[in-house]
Image: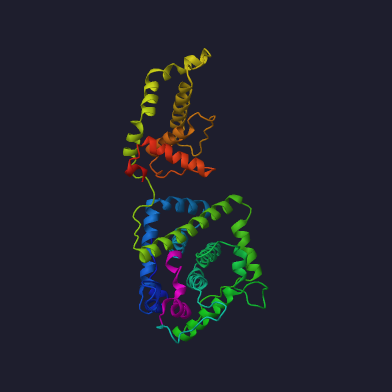
């Protein structure tokens, strides 16, 4: 996957004078504290984004989304979309060029005299990042010749900007976000987006002698057209888009958190929870008394199972039933390994936890793209109980338990 990040200095040259975070002894003045530049933070976020996309094979999901959602889009249009998508990371904090943010949060007065947003925006930065993103990409979208591709990509530009605007909070109503760009004369709701765009207009006129490239506000008829396109008659397209936006939002929040922790706490994340090599875990698991007993049964008694079922003879002991359910589940999984959803139903005391653990290992062994296991339990007591059982299985071997 080839990721093309945009150079922030090409978007706003003043980023070179800006900081993203500060750390150090709280007794020191704000000016004395160690500071991370905005460019350093952005580059660190980009590095974590590349790592997560690689380690978690996110490119496979992205490619599937493109195939399903943009079935008729040209290769050039897809490439433009990918640039917009990846650079959500690049633009997410560019609004920190806000002089109010730099002065209040960073003790940085390098931008003194530059255009300042009004009190409605104050020292906020996310909403400014979103309008800078829109200003940059809407201008480029307008240059695309194909009308249908232009409309579709413009929709995604607004959705991406919404993720940027909300990356320190929750994904609230998209409609409300769009309406926030309307002036007081056009809406009764919040107009934070409108104030942000007024700042950008003033910033460009005063600092760069430029005009805002494209108006951000969509009139009601244009909004209706957008929602018609992104909802339409095909419900599956809505599901694809919802899944994509949640994934990209999660990536943005994650990389921002990892990069900030990296700087603030010196915690550099090197592993992302995937199981790259579980051979030592499986080896330890298969050496347990329970597993050795099951494998011995598999060799000696399990072949007779079908004959016994035909004759309707009962198993001798409950352990035989547990073992046979374990082996039945394993064999069924192997026969249908290319399917995606399996349902295991067993009564209490039948050994579901051990069976599920084995099935998880079998999946990871046989499906190369699977490298993570999630256990979801309805009660904390079951979580504690399962951790205790895992400790017994693996003899509390520290490397495996970690």
Q: Is residue 255 left or right of residue 138?
A: left
Residue sitting nearer the eye, 302 or 351: 351
Taking the magenta stretch, the answer to whether it contains residue 97 is yes
Q: Which residues are magenta?
A: 88-108
Residue extending furthest toward the front: 27
- x then y, percent, for residue 40: 35, 69
Q: Is residue 315 above or below residue 167?
A: above
Residue sitting nearer the eye, 251 or 231: 251
- x then y, percent, for residue 188: 68, 73
- x then y, percent, for residue 10: 39, 75
Q: Quadrant of the N terminus?
A: bottom left
Q: Which residue is drawn at the image coordinates 58% and 76% (left, top)?
A: 194
Q: Is residue 171 above or below residue 199?
A: above
Q: Is residue 4 visible?
A: no
Q: Is residue 179 left or right of residue 244?
A: right
- Number of marks: 0
Rendered image coloring scheme:
rainbow
Give the prevailing secondary structure in the magenta stretch. Answer: helix
């Amino acid at each position: 996957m080839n990721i093309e990040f945009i150079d922030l200095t090409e978007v706003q040259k003043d980023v070179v004078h800006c900081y993203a975070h500060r750390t150090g002894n709280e007794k020191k003045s704000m000016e004395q504290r160690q500071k991370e530049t905005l460019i350093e933070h952005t580059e660190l976020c980009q590095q974590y984004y590349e790592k997560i996309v690689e380690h978690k094979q996110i490119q496979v999901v992205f490619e599937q989304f493109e195939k399903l959602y943009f079935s008729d889009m040209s290769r050039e249009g897809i490439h433009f979309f990918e640039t917009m998508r990846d650079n959500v990371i690049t633009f997410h904090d560019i609004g920190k060029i806000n002089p109010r943010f730099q002065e209040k949060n960073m003790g940085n007065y390098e931008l003194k005299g530059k255009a300042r947003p009004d009190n409605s925006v104050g020292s906020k930065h996310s909403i400014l990042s979103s309008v800078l993103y829109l200003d940059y990409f809407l201008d480029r979208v307008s240059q695309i010749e194909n009308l249908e591709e232009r409309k579709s990509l413009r929709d995604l530009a607004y959705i991406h900007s919404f993720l940027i605007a909300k990356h320190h909070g929750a994904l609230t109503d998209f409609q409300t976000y769009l309406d926030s760009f309307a002036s007081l004369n056009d809406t009764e709701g919040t107009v934070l987006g409108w104030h942000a765009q007024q700042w950008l207009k003033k910033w460009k006129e005063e600092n760069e002698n430029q005009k805002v490239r494209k108006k951000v506000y969509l009139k009601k008829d244009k909004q209706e057209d957008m929602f018609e396109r992104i909802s339409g008659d095909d419900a599956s397209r809505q599901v694809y888009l919802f899944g994509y936006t949640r994934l990209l939002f999660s990536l943005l929040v994650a990389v921002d958190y990892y990069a900030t922790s990296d700087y603030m706490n010196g915690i550099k994340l090197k592993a992302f929870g995937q199981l790259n090599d579980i051979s030592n875990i499986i080896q330890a698991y298969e050496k347990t008394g329970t597993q050795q007993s099951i494998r011995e049964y598999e060799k000696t008694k399990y072949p007779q199972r079908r004959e016994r079922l035909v004759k309707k003879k009962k198993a001798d002991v409950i352990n035989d039933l547990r073992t046979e359910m374990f082996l039945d589940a394993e064999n069924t999984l192997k026969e249908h390994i290319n399917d995606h959803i399996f349902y295991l139903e067993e009564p209490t005391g039948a050994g579901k936890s051990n069976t599920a653990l084995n099935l998880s290992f079998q999946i990871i062994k046989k499906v190369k793209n699977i490298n993570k296991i999630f256990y979801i339990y309805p009660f904390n007591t079951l979580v504690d109980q399962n951790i205790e059982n895992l400790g017994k299985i693996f003899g509390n071997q520290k490397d495996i338990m970690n």
